[in-house]
Image: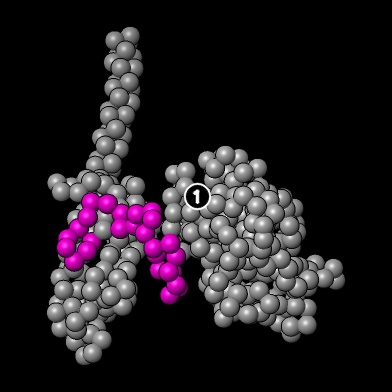
Amino acid sequence: MKSSARLKFFTLIELLIVISIIGIIISISFVSFSNVRQKGRDTKRIADIKLIQKSLEDYYRDEGSYPATLTPGQSLIGSSSNTIYMQIIPQNPSPKNDGVCPDREYTYEIAATSTSYKMDFCLSESTAQLTAGEKCATPQGVLNRDCFLCGDTISYSGEPYPTVLIGGQCWLAKNLNVGTKINSGSSEPACHDVSSGSGHWSCQVDPATVEKYCYNDDASSECATYGGLYEWAEAMGFPYQCNNADFSSGSSNCGTANTYTVANEHQGICPSGWHIANYADTAILDNYLGGLEVAGGKIKEAGTTHWSSPNTGADNSSNFTGLPGGYRNCNGAYFSLQYNGIFLISTKPANTINSGIVDLAFNATTAAEYDIYRVAGHSIRCVKN
């Protein structure tokens, strides 16, 4: 009986060992299978890019220029003919964010002369010729790097934006100017008081359209020179009610059916791959330039072409080229053009009505930071992710 019990006891242990070994084998097999699928997606990405490059060269040979746009999932048709060069432009296989890769489609950009192009794509692992990471397809071949280098000028919403590297961060060197111009003021029929009678007027209320204020409602002069002015909610891509909602936890439904969350790198109305400057970004910028007391002078555009005299300490040694676009007050009035450049900070607001800003002044070298009404309108600078 003892011998039989001992045999039964050891059999159970052996069974557990076998089960554990099977589990390990299954786990290893699953990882290996996942790696095979990931490699397969990289193989398809390379094949997609080669096919797109060939089609673009056929297009260029016949049309005399490269196409203005190229949208994955759609057709590529000649601009002066009905020739179909690609029935369906390939899409980046999902999941797109393999390894070090961002979650985005293949991204195409044509040169200003229409005689060249750049197309961003990404590989999750190294191949024989290319390392893992962002790659750039051009008419000359595939570059083993991102298409974008800080210092390049990017095109966004039909407008050029120079970029500048400051302290390891890449910034737009121009105030954002995107969206449809709308008028400001409590007398405007589309505007809403977001705080129950206290006179905090939001006019950027259309959820389907990016809207901007232009100083004195003058798009041709002021927005073209100083960029647009944006409420916090509009800049973040949230409904206007979020200008007066509790974001102390980082999220709010703003009284609507959806929940809106403030991301650390929040794209909002910035280009893809960029985000609205946050407190961490401005801290890095200010510290690199010597601290808040002197950073303003190094950020401001030099001279008095746009700044009012004396434009204290302004030398633009950072090449940030900060401009004094003024601001749109919560009551709808405009103030301080050529006297102050006030830039919105995306990081979650401290309370239900305020957001952070950086204030550059015509008579100071400082880059002051403080809170101001979210529903007011401010300039926007974007930082590369």
| In the image, farthest residue toward the top | 2
- Relative to 331, 338 lies left or right: left
Q: Nearer the viewer, residue 342 or 302?
A: 302
Judging by the rendered image, the residue that carries numbered circle 1 is 318
Residue 241 seen anywhere in this rendered image of the structure: no
The answer to whether residue 256 is magenta is no
* Number of on-image labels: 1
Give the residue drawn at x 26%, y 68%: 117
**Quadrant of the snapshot with the N terminus:** top left
Give the residue drawn at x 20%, y 49%: 130
- Asked which quadrant contains residue 15, the reply is top left
Where does residue 103 sit, x and y in percent of width and height?
39, 57
Where does residue 232 sit, x and y in percent of width and height?
65, 63
Q: Amino acid at mark 1?
A: Ser
Q: Is residue 65 above or below residue 162?
A: below
Q: Nearer the viewer, residue 287 or 207?
A: 287
Figure colour scheme: one colour
Element class at badge 1: loop
- Asked which quadrant contains residue 154, the reply is bottom left
Give the residue drawn at x 15%, y 48%: 129
Magenta range? 137-162
